[in-house]
Image (spheres, rainbow, N blue to C red):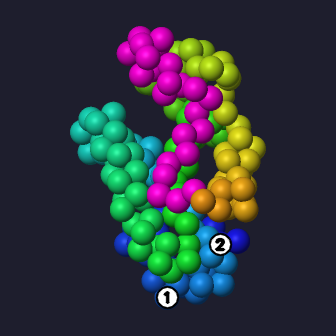
Amino acid sequence: MALIDRIGGASGLPDTEVREAVGSQHLLLLTNGSSLKGHLVAIRGGDPGLAYTFAKRGNHVRVRAQSVAWGERGARLNSISPGVIATPMGLAELAGGSGAFMQAMVDGSGTGRLGTADDIAAATEFLVGPSAAFITGTDLLVDGGAVGALTTNQIAF
């Protein structure tokens, strides 16, 4: 299986290396880097929430649009959107300025807990495995139900 993070210009990965990986493995996974983009905008004095939203949506559109071209090369292209994950970065965000809101998202989610690296690994394992052979051009939301709770007004924001 080939697992390639952030294809294209942002990754600096030469297209020939991508083609080699795809040609031999028939799989490509694109992960989202929206949190980083939001932080970079905040450093410059912009609205990180707005930057995050646009970056996340841009990733979704890019994956959907590029899935046909990559499919012609024998690859499936998907993205994973993690929720609040118990990693050093996730814990630092919980301790930061938006921590109360993030904790409310966790508490109001269907699972009521932080995600783990193992949760993301399991989602990745599913997407790169044979059970997902007909899945391409989509984003897998791995957030314990936080977005569902937000979009149905079960969490105030």
What is the C-alpha distance between the residues marked 2 and 1? Answer: 14 Å
Q: Position of residue 117 (x, y in %)?
A: 70, 44
Task: Identify the mark nearer the N-term, 2 or 1.
Answer: 2
Residue carrying label 2 = 2
> What quarter of the picture does the N terminus occupy?
bottom right
> Mark 1, residues whose alpha carbon is within 10 Å: few (<14), some, or many (≥20)?
few
Q: Residue at x 60, y 59 (%)?
A: 134
> Mark 2, residues whose alpha carbon is within 10 Å: few (<14), some, or many (≥20)?
some
Q: Residue at x 56, y 15 (%)?
A: 108
Dot 2: what SS? loop
Closest to the observer: 37 or 63? 63
Q: Which mark is residue 16?
A: 1
Q: Position of residue 59 (x, y in %)?
A: 39, 53
For the record, the magenta segment spans 135-157
The stretch drawn in magenta includes residue 38: no
Q: Position of residue 7 (x, y in %)?
A: 46, 69
